[in-house]
Amino acid sequence: MIFCKNSYRNLILGLIAMLVFASCKNTDEVAVPSFLHVNAISVAKPADGPFASESDGFFTSDINAAYVVAYYPGHSAVDTIGGFQLPFTVPIRYTGQAEYIEIYPMIKISGTSGMRGFYPFYSMIVLRDSLMFNELDTLKFDTLKAYYAATMDAPLKKEFFEPTQGGIIFDSVVNWVRHDASAACTGFGCGNVHINADQNHVDFKMTEKCTGLDPNIVGSKTVYLELDYRGNKRLSVEMTSARERGGNETTEEIMTINPSDTWKKIYITLGRTWKWFNFNPEFRIVFSVLNAEGTEGDIWIDNVKIISTSAS
């Protein structure tokens, strides 16, 4: 039998095509995902417990991301969905009834976008009911509720500037604005510090030191300052303490907050600066309004609290 060159070429190409198709498994299926949508997460006031009597200002929040995991019956481990900026719509790889989904609130640590992380004082959100995922369906949640964790101790310091208070925890540099809901972040009061054009900076501080933390308990070293702020000047946040009890006190800057025309919530970690002071159980938080521009300006603060936990 005689074959021409074209016949040999066609034979080779045919064999290659047979091998390619033979390697494909027709039984392979691509899973069609369902979706989970979360629009927002806010911190709610509990019906009972140690924080049930707190004012609304206690529960201001800025949860801008979340970490999601899911568990399905019969699976040996949780299915890690991942961390996502709010609002998010994410694909769920499995269909059917999910046993539960855990959502961990995340914040900008010290207001830094590149330092999102879990906030140790917010409990995870567990979704258990009606978690049926059908192909291409979206399970939607408008606003999920988070709560302060039970392991959080009572605040070391707190200030909500409400008119019903007997006084405030800041020195006289801070003007106590009362009975003015339009000026406040929440409620009817806030604090205001004014700076004149000829002033380089204006300092103010908490009148009492923070005490009561036991640095020998690992969990107590997780310390945060929460506050709401607005203003047209930069605000330096600082810590004053001594590296040993009875020693000379010095002041170290923690961070500088940039101006904002609207109220913003910020979570400031104090642990690194406190470590510089060898975790001295006595320290004070001080502030400085900065005026490099040489212009008149104002800073407003509200809902200030310093929190920690004794949990190990």
Image: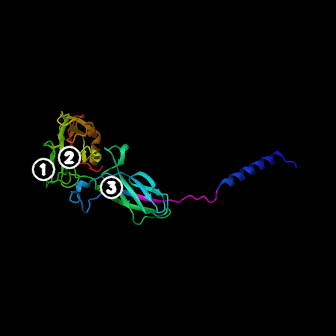
Residue at coordinates 41% horizontally, 66% vertically from top-left? 130
Q: Is residue 11 magenta?
A: no
- For residue 235, side relative to residue 82 (left or right): left
Compute the Cα span from label 2 to label 3.
24 Å
Q: Position of residue 65 (x, y in %)?
A: 37, 51
User: Which label's residue is closer to the chain start, 3 or 1?
Assistant: 3
Residue at coordinates 36% horizontally, 46% vertically from top-left? 116
Residue pointed to by mark 1? 167
Q: Secondary structure at mark 1?
A: loop
Residue pointed to by mark 3? 123
Q: Tell us which disc is closer to us: 2 or 3.
A: 2
> Amino acid under label 2?
Gly
Range drawn in magenta: 25-37
Residue 254 placement: quadrant: top left
Residue pointed to by mark 2? 212
Q: Tell us which disc is closer to us: 1 or 2.
A: 2
Residue at coordinates 82% horizontally, 45% vertically from top-left? 5
Please rate how many residues cluster around mark 2, counting C-alpha atoms within 10 Å: few if below 14, some from 14 to 19, many from 20: few
Q: Main secondary structure of the magenta part?
A: loop
